[in-house]
């Protein structure tokens, strides 16, 4: 009788071990790294053939199962990942997203033209915005971002991601990049490997502008350049010189405005630099 009881205990224990192993396998069904905060970039990996959704929207994967998720400036405190396995099994994971406090600056008594562009420039601005949007949507399938990232220039940080100005009582768009100030002609480098998808030397807002696609919908925009030395369609390597710092466009002084975007979601370049580059 005692032996039967012991055998029963062993069987139950074995079933528990199988159950826990099963849970561990599911917990390890995908990897996810990055900055779990507003403006952050998450990079993960699932098994080939799996379908992944984030907050109800399907997320593309590459040929290795790798995927990227961008967390917008005002992302809520929670997010949901759903993975549909090849066998139709579903895995759900809840994410906690850190909330940030952004700097708001109020400036009054400004000249009207400094707050709102004159109407005669509206059509130009519209066309330039369409050109920028098209460039950012370029279908670059290589995952060049795996090379990691470097700060594209030296200088003093004078503007940060997420901050917002209220000019003459009118809330303006938040700042979606980081501003790095230095003298005119300071070298500007490619922050990572990628393909140059846009070169414009005189855009209304950003002046001399270069946009680099790092692949899979991830782009860097480098604004206010005095000189550009790369051509549209060319491949650039991380750290390669692409131009010189300037004060072109609607800039109040010599600086670089570096912005990053993932499939329409503006992310914080500073968080990309802080993230361990091995995650890329």
Image (cartoon, helix red, strand yellow):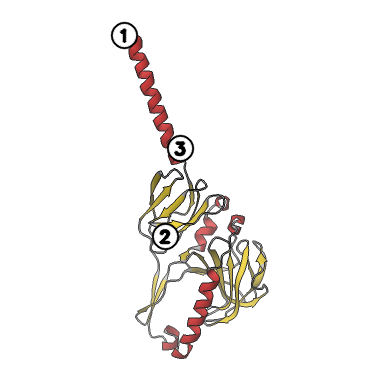
Residue at label 3?
25
Q: Residue at x 38, y 47 (%)?
A: 92
Mark with earlier residue (1, 2): 1
Q: Residues within 10 Å of mark 2 (few under 14, many from 20)?
A: many
Rendered image quadrant of residue 222: bottom right
Seen from the viewer's position, the closer of residues 16 and 175 is 16
Mark with earlier residue (1, 3): 1
Under circle 1, the secondary element is: loop
Q: Is residue 203 visible?
A: yes
71 sits to left or right of 232: left
Q: Residues within 10 Å of mark 3 (few under 14, many from 20)?
A: few
For residue 233, above or below residue 52: below
In the rendered structure, find residue 1 and report the number of the disc placed on it.
Answer: 1
Under circle 2, the secondary element is: loop
Under circle 3, the secondary element is: helix
Disc 1 versus disc 2: nearer the observer: 1
Disc 2 versus disc 3: nearer the observer: 3
Name the residue furthest left.
1
Name the residue furthest front.
87
Q: Residues within 10 Å of mark 1 (few under 14, many from 20)?
A: few
Q: Is residue 257 visible?
A: no
Question: How far is disc 1 from disc 2 in space, using C-alphas?
Answer: 61 Å
Rendered image quadrant of residue 232: bottom right
For residue 196, above or below residue 149: below
Residue at label 2?
38
For residue 109, above or below residue 95: below
* Residue 43 horizontal/vertical position (percent): 50, 53
Mark with earlier residue (2, 3): 3
Question: How far is disc 1 from disc 3 in space, using C-alphas?
Answer: 36 Å
Give the position of the N terminus as an image quadrant.
Answer: top left
């Amino acid at each position: 009788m005692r032996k039967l009881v012991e055998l029963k205990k062993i069987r139950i224990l074995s079933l528990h071990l199988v159950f826990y192993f099963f849970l561990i396998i599911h917990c390890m069904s995908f990897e996810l790294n990055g900055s779990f905060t507003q403006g952050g970039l998450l990079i993960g990996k699932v098994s080939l053939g799996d379908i992944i959704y984030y907050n109800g929207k399907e997320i593309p994967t590459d040929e290795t199962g790798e995927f990227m998720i961008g967390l917008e400036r005002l992302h809520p405190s929670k997010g949901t990942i759903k993975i549909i396995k090849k066998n139709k099994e579903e895995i759900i994971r809840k994410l906690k997203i850190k909330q940030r406090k952004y700097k708001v600056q109020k400036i009054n008594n400004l000249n009207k033209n400094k707050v709102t562009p004159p109407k005669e420039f509206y059509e130009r601005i519209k066309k330039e915005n369409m050109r920028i949007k098209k460039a950012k949507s370029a279908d670059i399938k290589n995952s060049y971002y795996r090379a990691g990232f470097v700060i594209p220039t030296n200088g003093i940080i004078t503007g940060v991601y997420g901050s917002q100005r209220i000019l003459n009582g009118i809330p303006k768009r938040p700042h979606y990049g980081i501003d790095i100030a230095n003298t005119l002609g300071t070298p500007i480098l490619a922050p990572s490997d990628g393909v140059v998808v846009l070169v414009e030397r005189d855009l209304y807002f950003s002046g001399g502008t270069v946009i680099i696609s790092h692949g899979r919908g991830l782009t860097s925009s480098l604004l206010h350049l005095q000189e550009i030395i790369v051509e549209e369609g060319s491949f650039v390597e991380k750290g390669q010189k692409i131009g010189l710092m300037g004060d072109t466009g609607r800039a109040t002084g010599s600086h670089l405005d570096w912005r990053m975007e993932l499939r329409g979601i503006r992310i914080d370049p500073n968080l990309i630099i802080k993230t361990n580059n091995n995650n890329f």
